[in-house]
Image: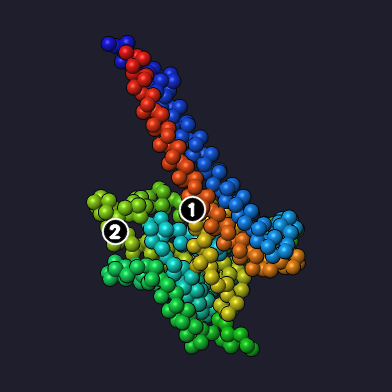
């Protein structure tokens, strides 16, 4: 009897299906499968995006090889690298704001309105120079965070109090934020300088210093890059290493299960929207504190919608979104190099859209393949278990 039990259970380190060795082999097999699939998804997306882009270029009468060569040469220039980093900083912060909502199954479409309204108010406060030096920088950041958080909190309250979809609420709040920002510029913060209506410039001692990270160019990298990195680390720690992050992810996966576990779902919805808006309020700060130092009609627009695409590209992962922000910035800034080949600048927009669709399709295909592979492996193990027991008997 003991020999039979020993044979069926397996000895440590052995390759039996029921023993420690068998478990180890199965675990290693799953790890190898997951690692291979994690690498396959982005590679499939890149290949598919390159293929579709090549077809578009051929239809437009342009050479895909010449276009890709021009993009490669453009991206390796020192000044271009600095510009790409500066734009990617804003894109990344916007993507983080969107991803916070995504992780709880909330679609904060209002990041665009939240960061623009925050930028207007923060620029007005910063231009007034109420505090000196670094204190004024901190004041600008606090104001931007508060405005973004409060504006997003409205959508959260509407959802929990009146059942209004956050998608509809945030889209409407975007329109209201645009009108409110225009009114604030016209009646309170804006100063007419020639034909330009802009806020008062932030004093020199309250501007974010740049960093000479890339040799061969006088173009500085925006100092807010450090803040973006800190935000990415904080995002990861908050969502993966804290109780709040666990409750947020649990609520996103199943609200009924979260309620049964004692999680205050309504509180989590409002808190998540407020947190998302707070981060969104910082999306325009690299431009305000490190580049233009004022808010005007030339202030970057559409960052909120770019953030949605980048969050999808990066699968809500802080490292993945960083890579997505760099790619998005590269494509956004590459239109000039394409125009030198008589290729329309809209081609870059097509490439961005195709890239997002490619990533979504590739990850969905890989996800389905992973499920099928796991089911096949489980079936093989189930079929092998009775045979092993029969041989042992």
Q: Residues within 10 Å of mark 2 (few under 14, many from 20)?
A: some
Q: Quadrant of residue 376?
A: top left
SS at badge 2: helix
Q: Residue furthest front?
A: 59
From what the image shows, is residue 61 above or below residue 50?
Answer: below
- Whole-Å distance between the Cαs marked 1 and 2? 24 Å
Q: Residue at x 58, y 88 (%)?
A: 192
Mark seen at residue 203: none
Q: Nearer the viewer, residue 133 or 331?
A: 331
Image-based side of 225 in relation to 139, left or right: right
Q: Secondary structure at mark 1?
A: loop
Position of residue 345 measured from the top left corner of the image (x, y, whole percent): 67, 68
Task: State which quarter of the image contains the C terminus.
Answer: top left
The residue tagged 2 is: 265
- Please tell me whether mark 1 or mark 2 is closer to you in this view: 1
Q: Quadrant of residue 77?
A: bottom right
- Residue 84 drawn above or below residue 118: above
Q: Nearer the viewer, residue 53 or 254?
A: 53
Q: From the viewer's perspective, is 184 left or right of 323?
A: left
Vertical side of 354 occupied by 138: above or below: below
Residue on which disc 1 sits = 315
Is residue 144 in view from this perspective?
no
């Amino acid at each position: 009897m003991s020999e039979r039990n020993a044979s069926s259970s397996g000895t440590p380190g052995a390759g039996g299906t029921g023993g420690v060795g068998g478990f180890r082999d199965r675990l290693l097999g799953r790890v190898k499968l997951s690692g291979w699939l994690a690498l396959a998804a982005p590679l499939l997306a890149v290949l598919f995006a390159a293929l579709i882009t090549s077809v578009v270029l051929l239809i437009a009468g342009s050479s895909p090889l010449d276009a890709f060569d021009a993009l490669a040469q453009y991206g390796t220039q020192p000044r271009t690298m600095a510009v790409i980093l500066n734009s990617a900083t804003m894109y990344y912060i916007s993507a983080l704001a969107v991803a916070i909502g995504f992780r709880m199954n909330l679609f904060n479409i209002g990041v665009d309105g939240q960061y623009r309204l925050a930028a207007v108010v923060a620029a007005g406060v910063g231009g007034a120079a109420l505090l000196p030096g670094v204190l004024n920088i901190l004041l600008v950041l606090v104001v931007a965070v508060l405005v973004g958080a409060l504006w997003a909190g409205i959508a959260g309250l509407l959802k929990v109090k009146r059942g209004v979809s956050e998608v509809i609420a945030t889209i409407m709040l975007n329109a209201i934020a645009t009108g409110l920002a225009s009114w604030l510029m016209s009646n309170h913060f804006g100063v007419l300088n020639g034909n330009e209506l802009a806020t008062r410039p932030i004093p020199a001692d309250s501007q974010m210093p740049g960093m000479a990270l890339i040799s061969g160019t006088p173009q500085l990298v925006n100092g807010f890059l450090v803040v973006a990195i800190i935000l990415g680390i904080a995002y990861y720690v908050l969502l993966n290493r804290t109780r709040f992050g666990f409750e947020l992810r649990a609520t996103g996966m199943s609200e009924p299960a979260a309620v049964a576990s004692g999680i205050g779902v309504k509180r989590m919805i409002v808190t998540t929207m407020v947190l998302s808006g707070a981060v969104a309020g910082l999306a325009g700060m690299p431009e305000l504190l490190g580049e233009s130092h004022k808010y005007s009609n030339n202030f970057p627009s559409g960052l909120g919608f770019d953030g949605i695409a980048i969050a999808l590209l990066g699968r809500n992962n802080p490292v993945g979104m960083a890579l997505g922000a760099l790619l998005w910035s590269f494509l956004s800034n590459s239109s000039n190099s394409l125009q030198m080949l008589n290729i329309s600048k809209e081609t870059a927009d097509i490439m961005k859209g195709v890239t997002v669709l490619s990533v979504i399709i590739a990850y969905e295909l890989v996800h389905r393949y992973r499920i099928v592979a796991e089911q096949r492996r489980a079936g093989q193990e189930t079929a092998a278990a009775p045979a092993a027991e029969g041989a042992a008997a």
